[in-house]
Image (tube, rainbow, N blue to C red):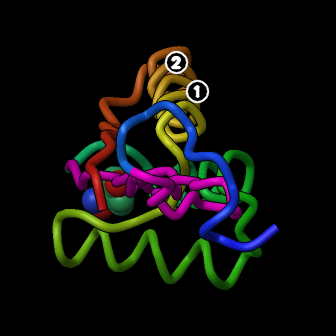
Amino acid sequence: MSDEQRPDDDDGDAGTGVVTRTKPKTKKPSLYKVLLLNDDYTPMEFVVHILERFFNKGPEEAMKIMLHVHQHGVGVCGLYTYEVAETKVTQVMDFARQHQHPLQCTMERE
Ligand code: TYC
């Protein structure tokens, strides 16, 4: 059937269409930095342990991050989706409180 012969559909636009998306549109999740803050009381070894235990850092990387926080006041432990970052912050804050250290951990959108 030619274009001239084909009956028009009833939407009144004589068959002009809208291009439809074939690939489903996906959104990348926002990432959040989990930050450790320096203080004068939390032992250095405790901070290194936190970085190994909750952020899966090796001993050398953990030491490097701890010293960065000690010297600069704040440092990034890792980048995570919102819920994972929130869980890390809670785990660190609970663990520090259990050991009566004033260590502070927060998160910030990348
Ligand atoms: N400033 C602490 C000390 O001298 C060590 C420390 C490092 C504390 C990093 C907190 O997030 C921190 N014992």
Q: Are marks 2 and 1 in contact (CB under 8 Å)?
A: yes
Classify 34 as above or below 99.
below
Quadrant assignment for the N terminus: bottom right
| Callout 2 crowding tier (Cα within 10 Å): few <14, some 14–19, many ≥20 | few
Closer to us: 93 or 28:
28
User: Pointer 1: what residue?
Assistant: 91
Which three-letter amino acid code belongs to the residue tagged 2? Answer: Asp
Which three-letter amino acid code belongs to the residue tagged 1? Answer: Gln
In the rendered structure, find residue 10 and report the number of the disc placed on it: none
User: Pointer 2: what residue?
Assistant: 94
Q: Quadrant of ligand 1?
A: bottom left
The residue stretch that appears in magenta:
14-39
Closer to us: 88 or 92:
88
| Callout 1 crowding tier (Cα within 10 Å): few <14, some 14–19, many ≥20 | some
Closer to us: 94 or 31:
31
Residue 9, percent from left and from top: 57, 39
Label 2, label 1: how far apart the Cα atoms are: 5 Å
Q: Is residue 85 left or right of residue 13?
A: right
Residue 62, percent from left and from top: 60, 72
Q: Is residue 55 left or right of residue 99?
A: right
Classify 53 as above or below 99.
below
What residue is rendered at 17% in x and 75% in y? 72
Q: Is residue 98 left or right of residue 70?
A: right
Residue 69, percent from left and from top: 30, 68
Give the residue furthest to the front: 5
Q: Is residue 97 magenta?
A: no
Residue 30, percent from left and from top: 42, 53
Q: How many marks?
A: 2
What residue is rendered at 56% in x and 46% in y? 8
